[in-house]
C-alpha cells in the first residue's frame, strides 16, 4: 500500500473514533509529517483523500478541520463482474465466490455477460467507461485470438482490472487469477500414462488461452514419457463449432487410440455419448478424461481435473479489493487444479 493511503486510513480511523471533535483542527503539517516520517507532499496527498471522503476541510491560512458532519457510512463502491456465461457449468460457483467476498467487504456487485462474443465484450467495456464502477473482474473473450478491445483496457487505467480464467496474450503486466491449466492437463495425461495408455489423443479449444495451455500440458506429458508427439493425435475446435466435431469421420480417428484428453467436461460428455452411440464402450474400448469437475462429471463417472470454482471467485474479489487500495503492483495467481479419479479410465496394466 502506498504511504499516503496508509496515512489516510490511519487518520480516518482516528477521526471516526472521535480523537478529534467535529470542527476541531488537526495537528499542523510539521507535526503530522514528523509523526509519519513523510514529506509534506505525501501528507497533503493523504489529506486530499480525506477531503474527497468528506471527513475533513482545509481552510486557507488556518489549517485542516474535521467537518461539521462525518458520514456515518461511506458510499458503497461497485465492482463489475463480467463473465462469458452466467447460469451454467462452472460459472455459478465463480460468481458466488466473488459475491461472498465483495458483499462481506461492503461492495456492490454488478454483473455483465459477454456470451464469449468480442462485440458484446466491447459494448460492456464502453458502458463501464462512463459508469461509477471502482473495479472490474473479467473473463476475457476468445483470448487466443486478436482482440480489438485490448485498446479499451488502456482507457480503464484508473479502474483496477482482474482477469479470471483467461486474458489476451497481447496484454502485459495484467493482474489475473486462473486455474493452473497447464499443470492440470499434464497431470491427467500423466495419469493415463501411469495406467498403461500409450496411444492418447487430445481434443482442445483453439480460440482461448486455456485450450492452448491445456494442449501444452498434454504434449509435454507425452514427450516426457517418451511417447510419440504426432499432430494427427489431436483435434481442435472453436467456441461456435464444437458440435461439428462429432460427425461419423471422428469414429475412425477414435479407433486408433485407447484414451482421449478432452478440453473440458462438456466435450468429454459429448464424446462419451458419441462413442457409445457408435459401438465404442467407455472405458473398455476408450478411456475419456475432462477438465473442470462440473456437476455432470460425477453423474457420468468422468475422470477429470477440478476447476477451483468458488475459490477462484473469492480470490479474484480479494485481489480487486487489494488493487483498489494499491493499484501499482499487479497480482498474478494460479490456483491448483487437482485430478479427480472416477470410472471413465481403464487400467490397461491389469
Image (tube, rainbow, N blue to C red):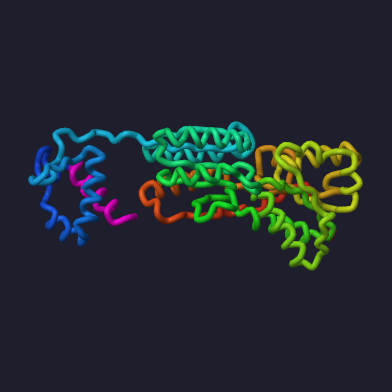
Q: Nearer the viewer, residue 302 or 124?
A: 124
Toward which corner of the image does residue 197 lie, by quadrant? bottom right
Expressed as whole percent of the image width and height from the top left, the position of residue 161 reads 47, 45
Q: Which residues are magenta?
A: 1-17
- What residue is shown at x 56% (from left), y 53% (from top)? 335
Provide the major secondary structure of the magenta segment: helix
Compared with residue 168, is residue 294 higher up or lower down, i.e. above or below?
above
- What residue is shown at x 87% (from left), y 36% (from top)? 277
Q: Is residue 212 magenta?
A: no
Residue 301 shows in this picture: no
Expressed as whole percent of the image width and height from the top left, the position of residue 102 reads 42, 39
Report how many numbered discs are placed on residues in the image.
Answer: 0
Compared with residue 302, is residue 329 higher up or lower down, i.e. above or below?
below
- What residue is shown at x 21% (from left), y 51% (from top)? 44
Expressed as whole percent of the image width and height from the top left, the position of residue 147 reads 60, 44
Quadrant location of the C terminus?
bottom right
Residue 212 shows in this picture: yes
Expressed as whole percent of the image width and height from the top left, the position of residue 195 reads 79, 59
- What residue is shown at x 65% (from left), y 56% (from top)? 182
Q: Nearer the viewer, residue 154 or 57?
A: 154
Q: Is residue 2 magenta?
A: yes
Quadrant location of the N terminus?
bottom left
Amino acid at each position: 500500500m502506498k504511504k499516503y493511503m496508509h496515512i489516510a486510513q490511519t487518520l480516518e480511523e482516528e477521526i471516526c473514533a472521535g480523537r478529534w471533535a467535529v470542527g476541531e483542527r488537526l495537528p499542523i503539517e510539521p507535526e503530522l509529517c514528523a509523526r509519519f516520517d513523510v514529506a509534506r507532499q505525501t501528507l497533503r496527498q493523504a489529506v486530499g483523500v480525506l477531503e474527497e471522503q468528506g471527513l475533513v476541510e482545509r481552510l486557507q491560512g488556518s489549517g485542516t478541520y474535521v467537518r461539521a458532519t462525518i458520514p456515518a457510512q461511506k458510499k458503497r463502491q461497485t465492482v463489475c463482474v463480467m463473465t462469458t456465461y452466467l447460469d451454467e457449468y462452472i460459472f455459478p460457483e465463480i460468481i458466488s465466490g466473488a459475491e461472498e467476498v465483495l458483499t462481506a467487504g461492503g461492495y456492490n456487485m454488478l454483473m455483465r455477460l459477454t456470451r464469449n462474443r468480442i462485440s458484446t465484450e466491447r459494448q460492456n467495456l464502453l458502458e463501464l467507461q462512463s459508469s461509477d464502477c471502482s473495479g472490474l473482474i473479467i473473463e476475457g473473450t476468445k483470448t487466443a485470438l486478436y482482440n480489438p478491445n485490448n485498446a479499451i483496457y488502456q482507457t480503464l487505467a484508473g479502474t483496477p482490472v482482474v482477469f479470471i480464467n483467461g486474458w489476451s496474450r497481447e496484454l502485459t503486466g495484467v493482474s489475473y487469477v486462473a486455474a493452473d491449466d497447464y499443470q492440470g492437463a499434464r497431470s491427467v495425461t500423466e495419469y493415463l500414462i501411469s495406467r498403461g495408455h500409450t496411444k492418447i489423443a487430445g481434443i482442445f479449444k483453439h480460440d482461448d488461452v486455456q485450450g492452448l495451455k491445456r494442449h501444452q500440458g498434454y504434449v509435454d506429458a507425452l514427450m516426457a514419457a517418451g511417447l510419440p508427439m504426432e499432430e494427427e493425435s489431436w483435434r481442435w475446435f472453436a467456441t461456435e463449432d464444437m458440435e461439428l466435431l462429432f460427425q461419423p469421420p471422428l469414429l475412425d480417428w477414435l479407433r486408433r487410440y485407447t484414451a482421449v484428453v478432452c478440453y473440458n467436461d462438456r466435450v468429454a460428455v459429448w464424446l462419451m455419448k458419441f462413442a457409445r452411440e457408435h459401438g465404442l464402450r467407455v472405458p473398455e474400448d476408450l478411456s475419456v478424461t475432462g477438465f473442470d469437475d462440473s456437476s455432470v462429471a460425477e453423474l457420468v463417472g468422468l475422470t477429470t481435473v477440478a476447476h477451483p470454482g468458488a475459490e477462484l471467485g473469492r480470490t479474484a474479489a480479494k485481489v480487486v479489493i487489494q488493487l483498489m487500495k494499491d493499484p501499482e503492483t499487479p497480482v498474478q495467481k494460479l490456483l491448483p487444479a487437482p485430478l479427480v479419479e472416477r470410472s471413465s479410465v481403464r487400467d490397461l496394466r491389469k
